[in-house]
Every structure is written in structure tokens, then in C-alpha cells.
Image (spheres, rainbow, N blue to C red):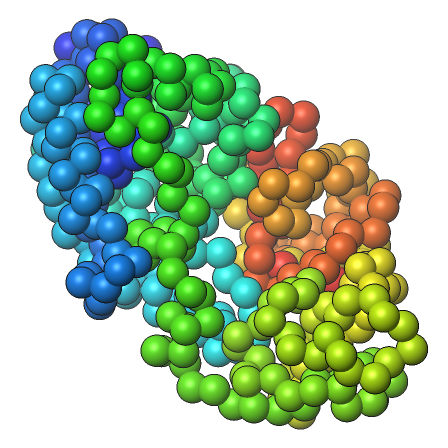
Amino acid sequence: MKINSKSRIVVGMSGGVDSSVTALLLKQQGYDVVGLFMKNWEDDDNDEYCSSRQDLLDAVSVADSIGIPIEAVNFSKEYKDRVFSYFLREYQAGRTPNPDILCNAEIKFKAFLDHAIALGADTIATGHYAQVREADGLFQLLKATDASKDQSYFLHRLNQAQLSRAMFPLGNLLKSEVRRIAEQHGLSNHAKKDSTGICFIGERPFREFLNRYLPTQPGEMRTPEGVVVGTHIGLSFYTLGQRQGLGIGGAKASSGEPWFVARKDMHHNRLIVVQGHDHPALLSPRLSALDSHWISGTAPQLHHPYGAKTRYRQADAACHFTELDGEKCTLAFTEAQWAVTPGQSVVVYDGEVCLGGAIIEGGLK
């Protein structure tokens, strides 16, 4: 992407070290940089888990240090309408959504992008670890150089228009380099801990948080053979592959191996649990997925070898498509995948290029 150094770039500044260094690097390159702090959550802004006030102070401190203007903008309504309502609907339906993915597509690269354009920006930049490349008139999303920090998984629903206006200055840096740059330039948040909570909501006890919005509906925990081994508090509060918080460690069973959630029987309000990490009920050689999105606008090829992630932070798993029908697809894996979870995203790669992905409907045998 060719951008003249006088171009205005609006940087999404969260108060964290990544977005701070993003702004710093662009300022050093001679761009007209404006910081934008997004506040997108207000429901319990005073509780111990909401750090938005401190984050804003950190962002303002960094902007002052770098010498750029910063504006705070409130997208709470957009977040609630476009992201959080979907998040709750999915949990209520027994699925496990990934709000960060929707948040990027609907807030950071839609509401934020629209606001930035209104401020006279040509481009927006964020502290994501990913890269954009223009090839043959199309914009490609690439993995970051730092494989342990790569965030292309969370950006796979971006489209051509969004990618054409996006910059990821950290894409070719290691996280350790980013922290070193921040420290060298005296940024006050150079050692600030990375946020790992729900997008814009923060880190908090998840079950307790969800219980504010969704009712409990207790039911039986059963083995696939129908043996009742415990009681669950509501199917919305569990995810496939979950081991902690089941409360059935001492249940009578054939082995002393740990218990895992294998399936949700929504019709009978039953949680199906199994013992052992590698229980066959937790393994799926294939999966079906819906609501597919391909970054180039063109679907991948049937039976062509690709790599895919069914969850963030896993290595690409060798696979190929056996069905591509509009927004629905079926993937077959060389090795069975563990705890394929409805509502999560399967993201497909051709080497370093992220092709896009789809929402997992379920694992298939």
C-alpha cells in the first residue's frame, strides 16, 4: 500500500503497549497520526474488572509523550447491538462464540473506520500482529512474523474494503522488540501486561459475568452410555473440551482420568461428559461450518491441500474441503481435531496467507 507521508492515519489506541508502539512508529515515519481511544462497554464500568479508565489514562499519557492528538469515542451502543447481543444469543443456543472476531469486523474495522474517515483519515492502524499485502489488485491478510503472537485468526472476517485501508505496523516485529522499542522511547506502559479478556469487556470470572445476562437451567451430566455422573448449572455455561469447573472429579467411573465436556444435548438439557483427553467422542476427522467469509471474495478450491485452525493458538492442521456450497462448507482433516466447538471459527490458510473462514456448525465422524 503506497501512502504519502503526509497522509493522516488514525490509530486505535487501547492503552496497551502494542497500539502505543504502532502510533510511535507511524509518527517516526512522518505520518499525520491521530490517536483514537474506543470505549465500548458501560454496563459495569465501576467494578474491579473494568480497566477502561486506567486504559484511557495510559493512552493519553502515551499520546502526549509521542506528541500526537488523541480523541476518546464511545461505541458502546454499536458494541451492544452488533457484538454483545450476538454473543448472548450464541451462548443461549449452546454454542461458544468468539466475540473478538466479530468485534474486529463490526467495531474496529467498521464503526472505528467510519469515524476515522470522518476525521479525514486515509487509513487506520491497529496494534494487531498480522500483515497486509497487495497482490494482483487484491489485498491479502498474512500471518505475523511472530508466530506466537499472530492474530490473523481474529481478523479473518475482514473484507477487501477494510483491508485496503488497514495498516498493521507490528506485523513484522517480535513482541520482545515491541516492548524494547516502548522502553527505549520512555513509554509509560512499556511493561504493561497484555489484556486477555473478552474484547472490550476485560478480564473477569466468566461464569459469574454470563450469569448476569443468562439464566441458570440445571440438568444432568451424563456419559455417552447414559450414566448420570453429576449436575450442570445450564448448558450455556460450558464449552466443548472444558475440564475445569465440572465438579465431578470423584464421580464413580471406570477410570481415574479427568472428565471433559464432549457434547451438549440441547433437547434434553443434558451435558455429555467423557473421561480422558483422547476419548473418541472428543475427536472429529471432519467438520461442517456455516456463514463462510473469504477475504478475496472467491471461495477456496475443493480437495486442494490447506491448513486450518479450529481454535486460536493451535498449529495449522492439514486439511481439504470436501464441500463448498455457498456459505456452507465441509472440511476433512489429515488428523482428527480435538473438541471441535460449535460457534467457534475455523480459519483457513494457504501457507502464510489467511483465506478467511467460517463458523463451526459441528464436528463430524
Q: Position of residue 64 (x, y in %)?
A: 9, 23
Residue 134 shows up from this direction: no
Quarter of the image with the C terminus in it: bottom right
Q: Residue at x 27, y 64 (%)?
A: 80
| Quadrant in the rendering for residue 286 | bottom right
Quadrant assignment for the N terminus: top left
Q: Position of residue 288 (x, y in %)?
A: 70, 60
The location of residue 231, given as percent across then percent down, is 64, 88
Name which residue lies at 12% across and 33% down. 60
Left or right: where 228 falls relative to 40? right
**Front-lying residue, 84 or 13:** 13
Closer to us: 200 or 190: 190
- Name the residue at 47% across, 27% down: 130
Look at the image and tell me whether residue 317 can be seen: yes
Name, please, the residue furthest toward the right: 254
Q: Where 134 falls versus 196 (above or below)? A: above
Image coordinates of residue 33 in percent, x first then y, are 16, 20
Position above or below: 217 against 64: below
Residue at 67 percent across and 30 percent down: it is 350
Residue furthest front as drawn: 250
**79 shown above or below 210:** above
Q: How many marks?
A: 0
Q: Is residue 23 left or right of residue 336?
A: left
